[in-house]
């Protein structure tokens, strides 16, 4: 019996799709995934290992595209950047 694809397993119950990504981008991420029950990958922006949930998986695919295809500067990318709204502080995902 063939093992299920780890990426399809992560995205199984989500609304996220891989339609925008090419085979080499998906395969590159697939090769960097470690662990089966709790899959993780190294995030080049945060500089640490992160658990792959559906949103994070798509985020990592976009990071690789920005860095490799578009040569976007790594130092200009940030996730969950703290933004002040009056007295409130909210975390926003952003690209500077």
Image (cartoon, rainbow, N blue to C red):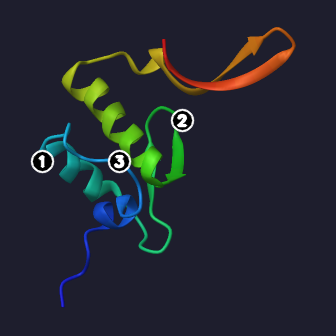
Q: Quadrant of residue 67?
A: top left
Tag nearer the camera, 2 or 3: 3
Q: Residue at x 35, y 67 (%)?
A: 9
**What residue is rendered at 48% in x and 55% in y?**
53
Q: In the image, residue 17 lies at what x, y percent?
A: 28, 47
Q: Residue furthest right?
A: 87
Label 1 SS: helix
The answer for how far apart the CA atoms under marks 1 and 2 are is: 25 Å
* Label 3 or label 1, whichever comes before in sequence order: 3
Q: Earlier in the sequence, mark 1 or mark 2?
A: 1
Which label belongs to residue 46? 2
Judge left or right: residue 20 versus residue 88: left
Quadrant containing the N terminus in the rendered view: bottom left
17 to the left or right of 27 = right
Q: Is residue 23 left or right of residue 35?
A: left
Q: Residue at x 37, y 50 (%)?
A: 15
Task: Give the number of marks.
Answer: 3
Instruction: Tell me which corner region of the image, top left, top right, bottom left or bottom right, holds residue 81.
Output: top right
Who is closer to the viewer here, 15 or 58? Answer: 15
Q: Which residue is mark 3?
A: 16
The residue tagged 1 is 23
Mark 2 and mark 3 in contact? Answer it, CB < 8 Å: no
Image spot of residue 58 (x, y percent): 37, 42
Q: CA distance from mark 2 to mark 3?
A: 22 Å
């Amino acid at each position: 019996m063939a093992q299920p694809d780890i990426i399809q397993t992560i995205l199984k119950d989500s609304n996220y799709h891989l339609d925008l990504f090419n085979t080499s981008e998906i395969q590159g991420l697939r090769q960097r995934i470690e662990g089966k029950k709790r899959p993780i990958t190294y995030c080049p922006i945060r500089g640490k290992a992160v658990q792959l949930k559906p949103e994070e998986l798509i985020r990592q695919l976009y990071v690789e595209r920005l860095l490799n295809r578009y040569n976007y500067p790594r130092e200009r990318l940030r996730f969950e950047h703290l933004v002040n709204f009056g007295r409130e502080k909210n975390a926003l995902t952003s690209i500077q």
